[in-house]
Image (cartoon, coloured by chain):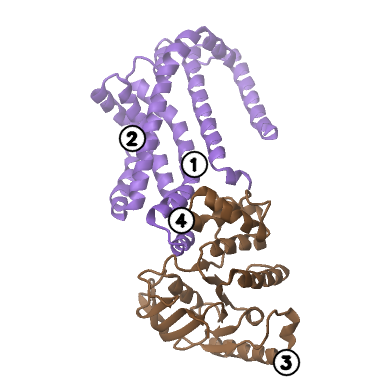
Amino acid sequence: MSRTIWPPAFLLAAFLLGWEAMARSVNKMFILPSPTSIIRKLWELKNPLFLEHLPATLAIVVIGLLISIIVGIGTAVWMSLSPSVEKALYPLIISSQMIPIIALAPIFVLWFGYTIWSKVVVTVLITFFPITVNTFDGLKSGSRELNELMLTMGARKQDIFFKLLVPSALPHFFSGLKVAVTLSVIGAAIGEWLGAQAGLGYFSRRMMTQFDGAAVFAPIVLLSTIGILLFLIVKWLENRMLKWRKHK
Amino acid sequence: MSKQVLAFQDVSFSYQDQQQNRSIPVLHSFSTQVYDREFITIIGASGSGKSTLFRLIAGLEEPDSGSILINGKKYKSRLGQTGYMPQKDLLMPWRTIEENAALPLELRGWRKKDIEEKVRPLLEEFGLSGVEDHFPHELSGGMRQRVSFLRTVLSGSNILLLDEPFSALDAITKLSMQEWLLDQWDKRKATIIFITHDVQEALLLSDRILIFAEKPVCSLQEVAVPLARPRRLKDLDDPAVLELKDHLLAQLRGKVGT
C-alpha cells in the first residue's frame, strides 16, 4: 500500500507547488487563487460550508445513489429474467445516455421547483446507467457450464439465480457502483447550479458571481473529497464481500 | 448377474447444429446396459459424441426416441438422478472448498449443521483437511479434481459420470489420482462410467470398455478387460492386455482417421 501511494502523492505535491508558484507570480487571486489561499478560505467559510452546504449536497448524493441502486438492480434483474423485457428496455437505456442530461436539468427545476428532488433526479439519471448495465452484464456472465452442472444436481431456477447468477454479478455490480459514486457528485453539482438554495455546487457558482476565486474552489475541494470518500467506501465493501478475489 | 442401474433402449438422438441449421445424428437405435458397481470406460476420439452420451444420461438432453432407464425406472426428468463430474473441475471461485463440495446437499435443502457433519469427515478422507476454508484457485489441479469428485459423490447418486476428469493433469498426478479413484469406487459402492481418450487409462481402470468410433452409433463395440483386481500398472504389460491395447488403438485410428 505505502509503496503504491508515493508516486501519485509526489506528483500531486509537485502539481500543487507549481500551481502555488504560478498563482503567486500572476497575483490575481480572484481569477487564479493559490492552493494555500483556497485552504485558508475553506477554514474561513467552515461554518456555512460544513453546516449548511455540505449536508445539502450529501443528502442529494446519498438519496440519488440509493434510488439508482434500487432502480438499477431492479431493472437489471427484470431484464435478465425476461428476454422480451431485455429487448424492449436495453436499447432505451442505452439511448437514454445520448440525452444531454445537463440540458434537461432546467426542466426538472420547472417540475420539482427548488426542492431536493430536482437535483436528485439529475443524479439518478446520471448514475443509474453504469449500475444497471454492469449488473445486467454480470447476471448474464454466469457460466453456462456451471448452470448445466447445477441442473444435473437437480437445481431449481431460484437456486441458479441466487447461487450462480448473483455471485457472478457481484464483481460487475461493484465496478458499476464505483463509476456511479464518482458521477453522483457531478450530478449533484450540476443539479445545484441550475436551481438550488443551498449546496456546494450552488455555493461555488454564487461565489463566481462575486469574483471570489478561492471561494469558488473551496467547495470544489469538498465535492472531490466526497467523491473520493464514497469511492473508498465502495472499495472497502467490495473487498469485504468479494474476499475470494483478494486471495488471488 | 447383478441388477441393471442404467439402460438405453433403442435410443436415437441427433444434435442440432444451430449455425449450419442441420441435425447431426449421434445415436441411432442404440441399446446398452450397465450393471451395479461396474466400472465402464467409454473411449473414442474427441468429437465422437461421448459427452453427448453423458448429457443424455444426466438429463441435459432428451432422446428423440427410445428410453433411458435409471435404476430400472423411467424418469420424467433425469436431472438430479446422477452424479456428473465435468471435464473441467468447475468449482465456484467465490465458494470455499467446503462450500463447493456441499453444493449438492445445499440444493437438496439440507440444514447447515447436517451438511457440516456429512462433509467434514469426507473432506478429511479425500485428503482435503486443512484447506476446507481455502478458495479453489489456491489449490493444485489434482486437489481441485478431488473436490470436484467429492461434490459428485455428495450428489448421493449411485451412478457417477466422469467426463475425462484427469485429462488436464500431469502424468504423475494422473497416476496417483487413478489409484485413488479405484479406491474410492470400491468404498462408495458406486457404478462409474468414465470417459477418456487414453487407452492405457481405460485398461487400467475398467471392467468393460465401450468404443465410440462410427457415427451415428448403433451399437458400441464392447471389450471386457481380462485383468483381476486390484491392478498394478505393470499388469498392463501382460501379453493379452498388450494385444488388446493394439486392437483398441487400431479401432480408434481406423474408424476416426478416415
Residue at the disc numbered 3: B239
Secondary element at tag 4? helix
- Tell me if B192 is positioned left or right of A183 in this view: right
Quadrant in the picture for residue A3: top right
**B137 or A211: nearer the viewer:** B137
Chain letter of disc 4? B
Q: CA distance from mark 1 to mark 4?
A: 30 Å
Q: Does residue B240 sit above or below A179 in this rendering?
A: below
Q: Give the alpha-carbon distance from disc 4 to disc 3, as whole Å.
A: 49 Å
Could you tell whether B67 is left or right of B226 in the image?
left
Identify residue type, mark 3: Pro
Q: Chain of mark 2?
A: A
Residue A19 in the image: x percent, y percent?
Answer: 59, 20
Badge nearest the viewer, 3 or 1: 3
Q: Between marks 4 and 2, how big is the CA–CA gap?
A: 48 Å
| Mark 1 Cα-neighbour bin, 10 Å: few <14, some 14–19, many ≥20 | some
* Residue A20 visible in the picture: yes
Helix, strand, or loop for circle 3?
helix
Query: Colour in which chain B is shown?
Result: brown
Q: Amino acid at mark 1?
A: Ser
Which quadrant holds residue A6? top right
The residue indicated by pointer 1 is A175
Q: Tell me the number on the disc at residue A100.
A: 2
Instruction: Please identify, in this view, whether the residue under mark 1 or under mark 4 is nearer the observer.
Output: 4
| Disc sitting over residue B107 in the figure | 4
